[in-house]
Image (tube, grey):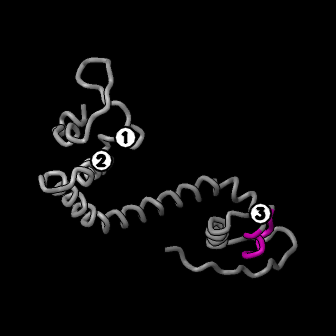
Amino acid sequence: MAEPLRILPPPTQKHGRRYAAQDRETAFVTYRAVRSLRETVKRTGVTVSTLHEWCKADGWIARADREDAEDIASARSAIGGQAMPALHRGIARLVKIVEDDASKDQDAIKATELLGKFTGTLAPANAGKPFADGPSTAARTVTAAELLALDPDQLTA
């Protein structure tokens, strides 16, 4: 994590103030948090013209976007790692429903549909649309019994 934001002391000279590299980095971290040069001026005391120069020279907008994307990817990865075991258990339950002959047709159809969506073999946009049967170009609607009888290769075809 980034270190806490600190307020820079006001400049001792009207013009020509020299800032340390740490001040410049603190200004960037502040800018990244607020995405406003005016707000960064208020929080750091660095002049808007200096911030504008730093922003342009150091590519703050692209850097902030890149760092945000990295943080988001890291968070997704952490969440995904925690969610995967539950997702695997859920998929196993769906498979049991589909394979269990005692399941109600509507439950088996819904489980099959969800499995298809998870695997990308049945896009939501295709749900309820006519199903092409074999090489023929004629399309027809599949019955519940036919859907349940399809093997995975037929579902992906």
Q: Residue at x 71, y 71 (%)?
A: 19
Q: Is residue 126 above or below residue 6?
A: above
Q: Which comes before the other along the chain, label 3 or label 2?
A: 3
Please indicate, yes or no, whether residue 104 appears anywhere in the rendered image: yes
Disc 3/disc 2 C-alpha distance (Å): 58 Å
Q: Which of 157 and 97 is in front in this view?
A: 97
Q: Residue 13: x, y in percent? A: 85, 76
In the rendering, which numbered label is found on residue 42?
Answer: none
Badge number at residue 127: 1
Amino acid at the residue labelled 1: Ala
Q: In the displayed image of the protein, which residue is found farthest to the right?
A: 14
* Quadrant of the image occupied by residue 31: bottom right
Is residue 4 part of the magenta span, yes or no? no
Badge 1 density bin: few <14, some 14–19, many ≥20, Cα 10 Å: few
Q: Give the range drawn in magenta.
A: 39-48
Mark 2 lies on residue: 113
**Vertical position of residue 150 compared to residue 139: above or below:** below
Q: Callout 2: 10 Å neighbours few (<14), some, many (20+)?
A: many
Q: Name the residue located 62 percent from the left edge and 72 percent from the top edge.
A: 22
Amino acid type assigned to the residue bearing label 2 in the image: Glu
Task: Name the amino acid, label 3.
Answer: Thr
Instruction: Pick whichever of labels 1 and 3 is earlier in the sequence.
Output: 3
Q: Which comes before the other along the chain, label 1 or label 2?
A: 2
* Count of numbered circles on the image: 3
Residue 86 rendering spot, x and y as whole percentages? 26, 66
Q: Nearer the viewer, residue 146 or 89?
A: 146
Q: How far from the left and from the top, in percent, is residue 155?
A: 23, 37
